[in-house]
Each structure stands twice: as C-alpha cells, then as structure tokens.
C-alpha cells in the first residue's frame, strides 16, 4: 500500500477508536446513564417482561444477608406480607430511594409488612456491588431491613425484576405469598420532596384495610440489572 493511501485510512481508524472510547466513558457516567435510562423507557412499557404477574404465587428464597445470616420469607411467621425491593449500591435511582426504603420499613414493619431488599447485580459487571460493598452500604445508609445478595441471579429472574429499584408487594393468603403490586415506590424516583403519589405505601395501606389494591402495577424506573 502506498503511504498516501495508508495515512487517510490510519486517520479514520484513529478517529473511530477515539470516538468509541469517548462514548464508552460517557456511558459509564451516572448523569448520562440516568438520562439514557429515562429516554429508553416509553409510557407503554410494562414493568415486567417476564416473571411474576399480579395474582401469582411468589416462591420463597434463601439468600445471604449483609450480617452473614441466611434469610427467607419463612423467617417471618407473623408477617402479613412482604415489601420485596430489588435495589443495589450504585444506581443513582437506587441511591435516591434509600431513605424512602428505610422509611417504608419503619412505617410498615410493625404493621406486618417488613421490607426485604435484594441486590441482583453481578459484581463482575458492576464492581461496586460486591457483598463487601453491600455491607458498607447497609451500615452507612442505616438500613433497618435485610439486604440480601442474589449471587446466582436466579431470584430476580424468577420475579422478573429488570430495574433497580423494582418493587414486589406480597401478601400471605392461605399459606401462599401472592403478588399484589409490582413497580415503582412512588411517582418521583429522582426527588422524594416532589412525590405526589406513594404507589407502594398506598397499596400496603389498602391491604391493611382489607381492600383490593387500586393501582396494581406501575412502571419501575431505574438502572437495568447488571448481569
């Protein structure tokens, strides 16, 4: 190949490579990831593409908590149901929800609906979601509930959780854990001060009052589960 022909080709390859690296770096920035997440979710999108739907029976699990113990739904014999939230250490949406999740546990645990948080992320893909980092997060954020590691990533797949955070409200009925609500905690995952409708809390209160849940499913807004 002549030098005159080779140089433009080399320049083109270099330009493409630099552009690709720049795009990759920008993709990993929390602010840009957040904007992309909002952009790809349409109003018509359902919260679950697979997994449990409203009225399904949720099977039990046995996952390691940050304190080293193993936790299952059956460990709560007096519970009326469970607030199962798939969340993680790193997603901006999950971080913005931490105080709300603690508040939900404090509000409903004594009423029979404890929070059980589960981290579904693969730490090989997201290094800040290791079990050790989970322990640090639980301590720093003052978690009052179990924070479990779905190391095999089978529990989130069975539920159909695709985002962090992603909520599943279960109620005990005839010895079964029945799915009553799926989706978001409330209508403003970015800003707790701007929340107008508390989807999850409303659903729990309706169950406590012996009523059917009015809003059974909403769109979970968050970061994609890292597999």
Image: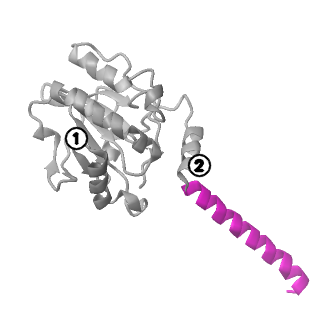
- Which percent across, then down, holds residue 118? 29, 46
Q: Nearer the viewer, residue 15 or 192?
A: 192
Residue lying farthest bottom?
A: 2
Span highlighted in magenta in the image: 1-28
Q: Position of residue 129 (x, y in %)?
A: 36, 57
In percent of width and height, residue 39 lies at 60, 39
Residue at 85%, 75% in the rendered image: 8
Label tally: 2
The disc label shown at residue 144, or none = 1
- Give the quadrant of the N terminus: bottom right
Tell me if I can see residue 185 in this picture.
yes
Q: Nearer the viewer, residue 1 or 28?
A: 28
Is residue 4 inside the magenta stretch? yes
Q: Callout 1: helix, strand or loop?
A: loop
Against 175, residue 17 (above or below) is below
- Can residue 164 be seen? no
**Hey, which residue is sitting farthest right in the picture?**
4
Horizontally, residue 186 falls left or right of residue 205, namely: right
The residue sitting at 55% across, 54% down in the picture is: 29
For mark 2, what is the residue?
32
For the residue pair 167 and 68, the one nearer the viewer reads as: 68
Rounded to the nearest angstrom, the CA distance separating label 2 from label 1 is 31 Å
């Amino acid at each position: 190949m002549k030098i005159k022909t080779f140089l433009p080709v080399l320049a083109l390859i270099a330009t493409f490579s630099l552009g690709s690296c720049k795009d990759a770096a920008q993709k990993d920035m929390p602010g840009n990831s957040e904007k992309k997440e909002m952009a790809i979710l349409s109003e018509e999108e359902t919260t679950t593409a697979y997994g449990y739907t409203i009225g399904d029976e949720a099977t039990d699990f046995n996952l390691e908590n940050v304190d080293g113990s193993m936790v299952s739904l059956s460990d709560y014999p007096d519970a009326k149901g469970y607030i199962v939230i798939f969340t993680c250490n790193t997603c901006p949406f999950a971080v913005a929800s931490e105080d709300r999740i603690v508040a939900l546990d404090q509000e409903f645990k004594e009423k029979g609906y404890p929070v059980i948080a589960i981290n579904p992320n693969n730490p090989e893909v997201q290094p800040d979601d290791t079990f050790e980092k989970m322990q640090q997060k639980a301590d720093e954020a003052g978690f009052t509930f179990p924070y479990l590691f779905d190391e095999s990533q089978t529990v989130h797949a069975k539920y159909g959780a695709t985002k962090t955070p992603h909520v599943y409200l279960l109620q005990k009925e005839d010895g079964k854990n029945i799915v009553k609500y799926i989706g978001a905690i409330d209508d403003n995952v970015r800003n707790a001060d701007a929340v107008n409708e508390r989807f999850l809390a409303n659903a729990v209160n309706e169950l406590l009052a012996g009523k059917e849940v009015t809003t059974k499913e909403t769109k979970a807004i968050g970061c994609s589960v890292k597999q």
